[in-house]
């Protein structure tokens, strides 16, 4: 994941003399200070367009009181560290339910103490030699000493594999039958293997690694890699089983970084599958010698074509494609705009390895009854029912590809749920950057403007809250320098205006620039997702009892029952897409409801209220703990779950009356407002849309409507094509839109139920109950 948010890192040149490094650092600091002074001196305020009422705005640097939304932070605004106390939050652990043995055996006990290393910093100590000449040739000597594992692919093993033998014997569909000559089949297998792969050439790999190392040093200050993560991967590699890397491709540079990191850390050559049509024969030959795999053309034929049966069997027996590696030319083209800019830092995130065999066995035990979104939510939206079925939502948006269609239905489900695990781990292990924190503050707290003196405290607070929730941050340093650096990165989307006594007023630029801030702030949503879902559920619960914009004290009078809170949270969970909620497929929605409630209590928004005659919430000694509840498997999603929740009927809560709660509650609700408002506007667009239409065509219609609405109300955050796609897909699952076949392809139509304007308005009102103004 590329990050340009880490200011003040020293250069990673091969010069290791301390005096030279100190002089270089001092020079860097002086240049940075001079740059800041020049930037401050060039700020101009147009007094004809900015009218500052000196009687209402009083900025006294000695009496500024910063609203931090949380207590105890006081004057601790000097520096930000990416850890709490002594340790940095550890992220990326595998699932304890589906892979308990991997959770225990592949975890490194001292991971908190290991820290990070710079994988592109090669010094004299990285070689077996010492001396002046070695320091000049350390990159070359390092590449010569790389440990390159020999290729273990054996054509005989491919011939003996089950898939190839089924084709030879005729047991597989399209197989040749018993009459085939084994020698001819063996030659055909060798021909296919020769097209797919070639033994990697150690000399070319060393030369390529040296060139990439030189290139990365020119491009980055450093490439960070957690030592503990690498130790866990090495421990998994010692089992002798093949390692399968599942990359999320957060950057185009993954194609260079991942092979380099794995080879430099002694984990072997990354074998990557390519489309042979994308390269010339000469380049294809070179890439094969560097470890590339090229699928034979006949392997891409339709599943019922007999010509590709043997080729597909050989591919399944010989290779494990890890994804597309973006070509070097594409990477260089994408970096064209970086040449004139400063060097940045990059971090390669790895999560804890796990056994795929263990996951396959254990994950099947967590499968329970599931229903479509139409079955779960449509009767409640239309007012035909008030009871939420005690089943999980079935919503799989994994792209249907040829290899996935070739699997059995049960295996397809296994792959889809594995992808949700991987997505959850990927988001959890990605560091939060300073631009995401700044965009979130400006967009959801201070869209009309905020003074820099106040922004410093809130930036520090939000960073601390991110670390407290177990997420990592990818920056550190002095708060003022970090904020100034982050604002310079967002200079195209914010305006800095100097006001009385030297303070700065930070104002977001209205217009499409808000969409960019919304995309950045979405990176912070997983940190506060549980609290945001809970806050929107509380908002829906209060919608019919107190005015939406009523005073906080009036809203705090209302008693909120735990059962009602569970119901509203479940409704919102069913409405929101699975890929945004990041729910693991082995986690029950009812368990997530309890997690949401716990988070609201922990952050101080809800306070337990004891009603007369009710059982005290903290009196565990008098609670009835049934054997059914105590010994229930975590993956059992039967209807008996709801019976145990009936015991919570007497538990009530109030909104806390602390002074910081109104702002924090509104902040949490606004985190989900872009998606919820996009869904509400999609419901309002139903009577205007031109249907039937293709899915892509209707998405374009909705996106244009969102843009037009944003021009009217100024809410550009929801004018995002990704939100338009999610809204169309959700309405399709909900039964609002129906997909029917046609000669031109699948077409979307409005379902008969939602052709009436009354039902369309019910859908819109159902969504808007969760939106806080």
Image (cartoon, rainbow, N blue to C red):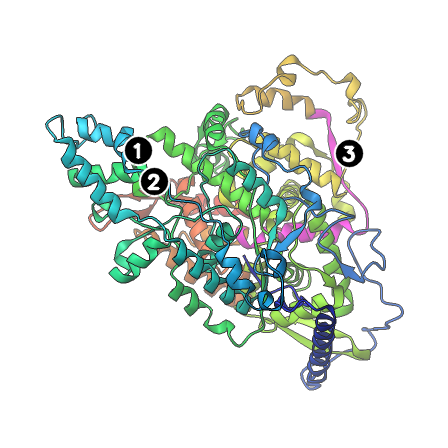
Residue 220 visible, this angle: yes
> What is the quadrant of residue 523 in the picture?
bottom right
Image marks 2 and 1: residues in contact by CB distance under 8 Å: yes
Residues rendered magenta in the picture: 649-675
Where is residue 440? Give x, y as percent. 64, 59
For the residues labelled 1 and 3, the Cα–Cα distance comes to 65 Å
User: In this view of the protein, which residue sits in the foreground, 185 or 344?
Assistant: 185
Q: Earlier in the sequence, mark 3 or mark 2?
A: 2
Vertical side of 190 occupied by 357: above or below: above
Secondary element under disc 3, as helix, strand or loop, is strand
Tell me, for residue 608, which label it has, or none.
Answer: 3
Q: Is residue 662 magenta?
A: yes
Vertical side of 475 occupied by 503: above or below: below
Q: Earlier in the sequence, mark 1 or mark 3?
A: 1
Tell me, for residue 153, which label it has, or none.
Answer: 2
Outermost left residue:
179
Task: Identify the residue under disc 1.
Answer: 157
Tell me, for residue 503, which label it has, or none.
Answer: none
User: In this view of the protein, which residue sits in the foreground, 429 or 614?
Assistant: 429
Secondary element under disc 2, as helix, strand or loop, is loop
For the residues labelled 2 and 1, the Cα–Cα distance comes to 8 Å
> What is the quadrant of residue 545 in the picture?
top right
Front disc: 1 or 3: 1
Marker count (numbered):
3
Front disc: 3 or 2: 2
Where is residue 127? Give x, y as percent. 58, 57
Is 11 placed left or right of 315 in the picture?
Answer: right
């Amino acid at each position: 994941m590329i990050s340009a948010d880490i200011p003040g890192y020293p250069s990673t040149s091969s010069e290791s003399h301390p005096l030279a490094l100190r002089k270089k650092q001092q020079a860097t600091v002086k240049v940075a200070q001079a740059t800041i002074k020049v930037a401050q001196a060039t700020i101009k305020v147009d007094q004809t367009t900015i009218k500052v009422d000196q009687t209402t705005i009083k900025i006294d640097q000695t009496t500024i009181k910063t609203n931090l939304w949380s207590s105890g932070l006081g004057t601790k605004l000097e520096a930000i560290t990416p850890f709490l106390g002594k340790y940095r939050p550890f992220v990326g652990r595998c699932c304890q339910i589906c892979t308990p043995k991997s959770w225990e055996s592949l975890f490194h006990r001292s991971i908190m103490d290991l820290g990070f290393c710079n994988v592109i910093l090669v010094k004299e100590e990285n070689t077996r030699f010492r001396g002046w000449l070695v320091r000049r040739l350390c990159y070359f000597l390092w590449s010569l000493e790389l440990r390159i594992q020999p290729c273990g692919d054996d054509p005989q093993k491919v011939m003996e594999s089950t898939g190839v033998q089924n084709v030879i014997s005729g047991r597989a569909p399209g197989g040749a039958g018993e009459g085939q000559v084994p020698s001819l089949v063996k030659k055909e297998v060798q021909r296919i293997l020769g097209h797919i792969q070639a033994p990697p050439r150690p000399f070319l790999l060393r030369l390529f690694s040296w060139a990439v190392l030189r290139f990365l040093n020119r491009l980055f200050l450093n490439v960070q890699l957690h030592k503990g993560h690498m130790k866990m991967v090495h421990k998994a590699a010692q089992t002798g089983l093949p390692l399968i890397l599942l990359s999320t491709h957060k950057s185009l540079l993954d194609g260079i970084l991942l092979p380099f990191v794995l080879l430099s850390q002694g984990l072997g050559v990354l074998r990557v599958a390519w489309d042979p049509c994308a390269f010339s024969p000469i380049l294809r030959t070179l890439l094969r010698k560097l470890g590339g795999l090229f699928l034979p053309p006949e392997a891409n034929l339709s599943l019922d074509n007999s010509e590709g049966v043997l080729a597909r069997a050989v591919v399944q027996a010989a290779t494990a494609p890890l994804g597309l590696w973006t070509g070097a030319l594409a990477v260089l083209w994408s970096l064209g705009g970086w040449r004139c800019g400063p060097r940045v830092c990059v971090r390669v995130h790895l999560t804890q390895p796990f056994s795929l065999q263990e996951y396959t066995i254990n994950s099947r035990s967590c499968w329970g009854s599931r229903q479509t979104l139409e079955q779960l939510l449509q009767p409640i939206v239309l007012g035909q029912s008030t009871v939420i079925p005690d089943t999980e939502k079935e919503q799989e948006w994994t792209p249907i590809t040829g290899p996935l269609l070739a699997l059995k239905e049960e295996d397809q489900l296994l792959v889809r749920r594995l992808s949700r695990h991987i997505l959850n781990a990927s988001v959890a292990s990605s560091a939060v950057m300073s631009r995401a924190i700044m965009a979130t503050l400006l967009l959801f707290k201070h869209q009309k403007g905020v003074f820099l003196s106040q922004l410093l405290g809130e930036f520090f607070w939000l960073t601390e809250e991110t670390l407290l929730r177990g997420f990592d941050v990818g920056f550190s340093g002095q708060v003022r320098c970090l904020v100034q650096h982050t604002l310079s990165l967002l200079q195209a989307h914010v305006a800095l205006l100097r006001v009385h006594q030297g303070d700065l007023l930070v104002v977001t630029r209205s217009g499409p620039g808000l969409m960019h801030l919304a995309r950045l702030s979405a990176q912070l949503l997983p940190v506060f997702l549980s609290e945001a879902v809970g806050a929107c559920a509380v908002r829906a619960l209060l919608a019919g009892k107190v005015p939406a914009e009523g005073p906080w004290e009036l809203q705090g009078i209302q008693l909120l029952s735990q059962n009602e809170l569970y119901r509203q949270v479940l409704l919102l969970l069913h409405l929101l897409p699975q890929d945004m909620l990041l729910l693991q497929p082995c986690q029950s929605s009812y368990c997530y409801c309890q997690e949401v409630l716990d988070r609201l209590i922990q952050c101080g928004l809800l306070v337990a209220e004891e009603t007369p005659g009710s059982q005290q919430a903290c009196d565990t000694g008098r609670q009835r703990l049934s054997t059914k509840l105590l010994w229930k498997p975590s993956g059992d999603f039967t209807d008996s779950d709801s019976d145990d929740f009936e015991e919570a009927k007497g538990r009530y809560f109030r909104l806390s009356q602390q002074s910081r709660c109104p702002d924090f509650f509104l902040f949490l609700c606004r985190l989900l407002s872009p998606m919820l408002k996009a869904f509400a506007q999609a419901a309002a667009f139903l009577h205007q849309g031109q249907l039937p239409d293709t899915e892509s065509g209707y998405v374009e219609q909705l996106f244009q409507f969102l843009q037009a609405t944003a021009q009217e109300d100024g809410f550009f955050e929801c004018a995002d094509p990704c939100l338009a796609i999610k809204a169309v897909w959700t309405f399709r699952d909900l039964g609002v839109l129906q997909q029917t076949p046609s000669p031109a392809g699948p077409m979307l139509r409005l379902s008969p139920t939602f052709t009436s304007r009354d039902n369309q308005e019910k859908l819109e009102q159902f969504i808007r109950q969760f939106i806080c103004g």
